[in-house]
Image: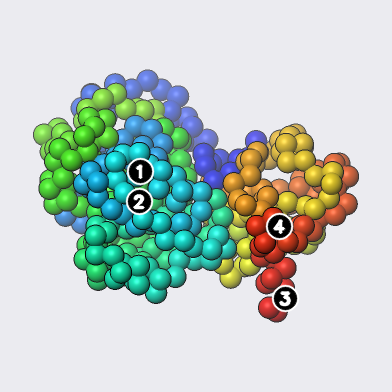
């Protein structure tokens, strides 16, 4: 079964095999493995040893995002959040429920964040201390120009937290050139092709020290984790997902062997383009024009055919060896296809054939989307064709 979802992703057999062992997390050998992992991800993030630190937290990306928000934004502090989609919405809720004040910056669902609008919003409100940026908006498939947006925030003297959960390892990042970034958050189970269960934060060491006691949480205090690492490198405060971390070490070996971030981005882009072209050939409409489409996840407008049934479609694809998301998370109904994981463009072409056969089996005769939804937005694909 190939997972065509934005994560957890299809992994290499050697990655899965590494988790099929028992590990003692406080054993010196395992502590050395964790310390090595932290140095490796620090390198991928473009951070500097001593200036930045990589920290491991049990759980999903939202756990690390909450930890970053609690650690770096003071209680009652204000952070601006460009509303790029569902994952920015989640960040807004997370900030609000941790006692911070979220300031939304509305962004069209099919557009990248406008740097000029961010610049104007920060100039208009000097009470904002932080900007929270989603690098790859998993709900829509759009990748935002986070390095440029972070630099704008820095020019205004604001700090930045980056949600790179579905971008890290594929999209470029050079933290050494972005001193305004307090933290970048990601997980083991997306573009680095590891297993789910652990999240990482790469943060500035000076900001970690300055934020001691601010989190008001023992579990989600990155400053406390950092202090613990200084006393015992690679040692966790609480029991970690040991097998996941051992598997992640193997996943990073494969990442390096492939050629690192540039090679991974190249393969994912080839995956996306093969999928995009194939879907158009069988009459389906990708939700975004190719000029806006990112390499991580591709949304497809749901067919207007009255026989369309997402759950039946998902089950039909499962029978053919492909698993996709079984829910909608965009205003205009669309199904998501992940382009990441240990998969190739040929896998994507096979997926297109499976999609075509499944639609035929369901007797879906109208594959074009319904134009003009309740929210007044027309199909992005139709608009793109009109411009051409």
Which quarter of the rendered picture does the N terminus lie within? top right
> Which residue is labeled 3 in the image?
386
Task: Tell me residue 63's x, y (percent).
Answer: 36, 37
Task: Indicate left or right for 44 with 312 as reference.
Answer: left
Is label 3 in a helix, a strand or a loop?
helix
> Which residue is labeled 1 in the image?
96
The answer to whether the residue labelled 3 contacts the one labelled 2, judged by CB atoms less than 8 Å apart, is: no
Which of disc 2 and disc 1 is earlier in sequence? 1
Which quarter of the rendered picture does the C terminus lie within? bottom right
> Which residue is labeled 4 in the image?
373
Which of disc 4 and disc 3 is earlier in sequence? 4
* Residues packed near mark 2 inside 10 Å, few (<14), some (14 to 19) or many (20 plus): many
Foreground mark, 1 or 3?
Answer: 1
Which of disc 4 and disc 1 is earlier in sequence? 1
Task: Tell me residue 315's x, y (percent).
Answer: 73, 34
Question: Which residue appears farthest toward the bottom when viewing the image?
Answer: 388
Q: Nearer the viewer, residue 183 or 21?
A: 183
Relative to 77, is 199 above or below?
A: above
Relative to 177, is 196 above or below?
A: above
Which of disc 2 and disc 4 is earlier in sequence? 2
* Residues packed near mark 1 inside 10 Å, few (<14), some (14 to 19) or many (20 plus): some
The answer to whether the residue labelled 1 contacts the one labelled 2, judged by CB atoms less than 8 Å apart, is: yes
Foreground mark, 3 or 4?
Answer: 4
Decide if residue 180 is in sight here: yes
> Which residue is labeled 2 in the image?
102
Q: Could you give the CA–CA distance between mark 3 and mark 4, rounded to whole angstroms?
A: 17 Å
């Amino acid at each position: 079964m190939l997972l065509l979802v934005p994560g957890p992703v299809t992994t290499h057999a050697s990655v899965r095999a590494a988790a099929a062992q028992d590990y003692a997390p406080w054993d010196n050998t395992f502590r050395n493995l964790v310390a090595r992992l932290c140095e490796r991800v620090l390198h991928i993030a473009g951070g500097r040893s001593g200036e930045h630190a990589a920290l491991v937290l049990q759980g999903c990306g939202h756990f690390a995002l909450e930890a970053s928000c609690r650690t770096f934004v003071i209680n009652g502090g204000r952070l601006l959040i460009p509303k790029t989609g569902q994952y920015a919405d989640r960040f807004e809720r997370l900030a609000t429920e941790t006692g911070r004040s979220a300031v939304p910056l509305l962004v069209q669902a099919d557009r990248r964040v406008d740097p000029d609008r961010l610049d104007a919003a920060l100039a208009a409100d000097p009470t904002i201390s932080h900007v929270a940026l989603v690098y790859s908006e998993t709900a829509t498939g759009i990748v935002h120009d986070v390095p440029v947006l972070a630099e704008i925030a820095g020019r205004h003297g604001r700090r930045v937290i980056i949600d790179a959960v579905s971008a890290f390892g594929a999209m470029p990042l050079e933290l050494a050139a972005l001193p305004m970034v307090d933290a970048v958050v990601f997980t083991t189970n997306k573009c680095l092709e590891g297993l789910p269960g652990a999240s990482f934060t790469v943060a500035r060491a000076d900001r970690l020290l300055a934020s001691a006691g601010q989190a008001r949480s023992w579990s989600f205090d990155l400053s406390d984790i950092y202090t613990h690492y200084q006393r015992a490198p690679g040692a966790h405060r609480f029991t970690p997902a040991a097998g996941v971390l051992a598997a992640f070490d193997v996943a990073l070996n494969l990442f390096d062997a492939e050629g690192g971030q540039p090679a991974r981005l190249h393969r994912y882009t080839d995956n996306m383009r093969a999928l995009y072209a194939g879907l158009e050939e069988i009459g389906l409409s990708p939700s975004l024009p190719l000029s806006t489409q990112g390499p991580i996840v591709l949304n497809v407008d749901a067919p207007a055919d009255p026989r369309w049934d997402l759950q039946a479609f998902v089950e039909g694809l499962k029978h053919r060896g492909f698993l996709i998301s079984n829910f909608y998370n965009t205003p205009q109904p669309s199904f998501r296809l992940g382009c990441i994981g240990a998969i190739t463009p040929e896998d994507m072409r096979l997926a297109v054939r499976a999609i075509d056969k499944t639609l035929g089996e369901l007797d879906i005769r109208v594959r074009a989307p319904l134009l003009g939804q309740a929210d007044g937005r027309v199909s992005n694909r139709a608009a793109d064709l009109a411009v051409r």
